[in-house]
Image (cartoon, rainbow, N blue to C red):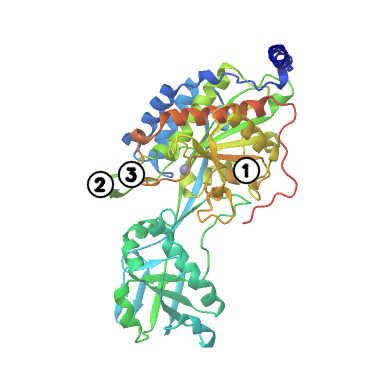
């Protein structure tokens, strides 16, 4: 017995020392990443002085200058425009003019954004009789052509168990009624709010007043409600008046603006003469929600988790690559205007500062410092969101070798109510055919509130996630074959 045991031990020792060096997972310069530095950077970036880093404002430009300086100190080479760390792009904003727009019904008039909330930011000029729809199920029998349909809404069938439910309520209800009405040829839609709408009116009004932001990219697929049929919400108190079917006149006037936003881009060149022309792209976003409605007397949305956490992780990873470069080059992109619907990444994915075909993979971090210390999610790891089995396998291997997070897979499923895969900067890259994954510790009660502050971050967890991303990127940076895009990859929307 003893002899067998001895032999077995000897065999094991012998065997493990015989694994060829290149098959052992190597950990590169992972020890360069320090929790204290992540914490220092995060407190600086989520500080009140940046006023919530709202994109298209000076506060976003201010934090981008701070960030570029950290990137320079970390030893990265500029990889933006004209030998700088900056890649500027234009945000195009359209919104309805509250001064020049008007809505009247009979002898009543309504102020846009106060008395009437427009769901569609498009110019319109409509004067038509109204039809009061008491029973929506029976609209098949109504003649609504060129009329203004008035619908007292009901929240029946609307899923309220979602993040920022108040803001999403208006769009969900609009989508419940609008398609059928538009099919009937209505000239405009008036939704009379219910109790739920009244409760959330003040939260949605400033959001709608901001209007729409977009960037000029060919493959935009930017989800903006773009129907030509104007749609307005009115207060519950208007209900009885509209039973008298007054004639309504709607005049909506558009204003357009252009603002600068910016991606910060740096690189660490690879060591392999051939592979160094390819890039492992590490992605995060530096903007957040700025100054909005106050909660507990605090109106600054600091975005510590969203997404100072991912931003400082990239700084840590950059320092490790600086200490020990991989065979491929490492590219670091801190995107602007993510909170305006991923506009910085839509821009970079279409107009990258390195050849698009040379981007081997995108590793995106967004909100990585909250929730259970041992749990994480890797979005883009489940079909149909998985666009590269090779990349996902590398990430799972790095998790096994490193932090061993328990990985949630529910949030990457098509039937999950949050649709979270479609809500961060990896997605535009997947759409243009680049292997892409998304590291996140998922939503939490202080998501998109002024309470998302540096003191709430779990720093040991943030360190572990940063190490995991680094180890994945380090592996991808050194393999001879770059990760392939899976054949037949197609997103469900
Ligand atoms: Zn975010």
Give the quadrant of residue 201: bottom left
Disc 1 and disc 2 in contact, CB within 8 angstroms: no
Q: CA distance from mark 2 to mark 3?
A: 9 Å
The answer to which of marks 1 and 3 sits earlier in the sequence is 1
Q: Nearer the viewer, residue 254 or 4?
A: 4
Q: Position of residue 217 (x, y in %)?
A: 60, 49
Residue 432 higher or lower than 233, as above or below: above
Q: Is mark 2 within 8 Å of ligand 1?
A: no
The answer to which of marks 1 and 2 sits earlier in the sequence is 2
- Left or right, 22 with respect to 363, comes to right
Disc 2 and disc 3 in contact, CB within 8 angstroms: yes
The dot on residue 450 is: 3
Give the quadrant of residue 479: top right
Q: Which residue is label 1 attached to? A: 381
Q: Quadrant of the C terminus?
A: bottom right
Q: Which residue is label 2 attached to? A: 296
Give the quadrant of residue 301: top left
Question: What is the secondary structure assignment of the residue under circle 2?
Answer: loop
Q: Quadrant of the N terminus?
A: top right
Q: Nearer the viewer, residue 83 or 276?
A: 276
């Amino acid at each position: 017995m003893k002899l067998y045991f001895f032999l077995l031990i000897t065999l094991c020792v012998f065997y493990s020392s015989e694994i060829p060096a290149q098959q052992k997972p190597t950990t590169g310069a992972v020890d360069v990443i320090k929790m204290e530095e992540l914490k220092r950077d995060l407190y600086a970036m989520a500080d009140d002085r940046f006023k919530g880093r709202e994109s298209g404002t000076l506060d976003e430009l201010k934090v981008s200058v701070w960030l570029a300086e950290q990137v320079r100190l970390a030893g990265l080479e500029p990889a933006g425009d004209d030998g700088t760390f900056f890649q500027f792009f234009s945000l195009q904003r359209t919104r309805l003019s509250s001064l020049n727009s008007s809505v009247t019904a009979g002898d009543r008039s309504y102020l846009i954004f106060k008395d009437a909330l427009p769901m569609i930011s498009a110019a319109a000029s409509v004067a038509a009789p109204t039809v009061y729809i008491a029973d929506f199920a029976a609209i098949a029998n109504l003649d609504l052509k060129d009329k203004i349909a008035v619908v007292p809404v009901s929240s029946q069938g609307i899923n309220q168990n979602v993040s920022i439910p108040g803001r999403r309520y208006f769009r969900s209800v609009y989508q419940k009624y609008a398609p059928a009405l538009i099919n009937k040829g209505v000239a405009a839609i008036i939704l009379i709010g219910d109790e739920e709408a009244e409760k959330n009116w003040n939260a949605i009004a400033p959001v709608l007043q901001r209007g729409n932001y977009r960037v000029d990219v060919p493959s935009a697929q930017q989800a903006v409600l773009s129907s030509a049929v104007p749609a307005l919400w009115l207060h519950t108190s208007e209900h009885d008046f509209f039973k008298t079917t007054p004639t309504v006149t709607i005049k909506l006037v558009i204003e357009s603006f252009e603002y600068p936003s910016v991606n910060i881009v740096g690189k660490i060149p690879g060591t392999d003469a051939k592979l160094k022309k390819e890039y492992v792209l590490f992605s995060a976003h530096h903007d957040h929600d700025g100054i909005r409605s106050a909660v507990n007397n605090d109106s600054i949305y600091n975005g510590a988790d969203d997404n100072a956490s991912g931003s400082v992780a990239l700084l840590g990873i950059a320092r490790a690559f600086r200490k020990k470069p991989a065979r491929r080059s490492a590219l670091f992109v801190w995107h602007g205007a993510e909170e305006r619907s991923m506009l910085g990444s839509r821009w970079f994915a279409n107009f990258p500062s390195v050849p698009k075909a040379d981007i081997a993979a995108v590793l995106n971090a967004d909100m990585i410092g909250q929730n259970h210390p041992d749990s994480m999610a890797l979005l883009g790891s489940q079909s149909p969101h998985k666009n590269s089995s090779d990349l996902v396998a590398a990430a799972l291997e790095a998790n096994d070798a490193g932090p061993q997070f328990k990985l949630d897979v529910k949030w990457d499923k098509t039937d999950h109510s949050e649709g979270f895969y479609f809500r961060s900067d990896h997605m535009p890259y997947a759409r243009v055919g680049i292997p892409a994954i998304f590291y996140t510790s998922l939503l939490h009660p202080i998501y998109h509130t002024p309470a998302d502050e540096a003191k709430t971050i779990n720093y040991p967890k943030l360190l572990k996630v940063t190490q995991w991303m680094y180890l994945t990127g380090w592996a991808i940076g050194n393999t001879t074959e770059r990760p392939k895009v899976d054949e037949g990859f197609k997103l469900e929307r």
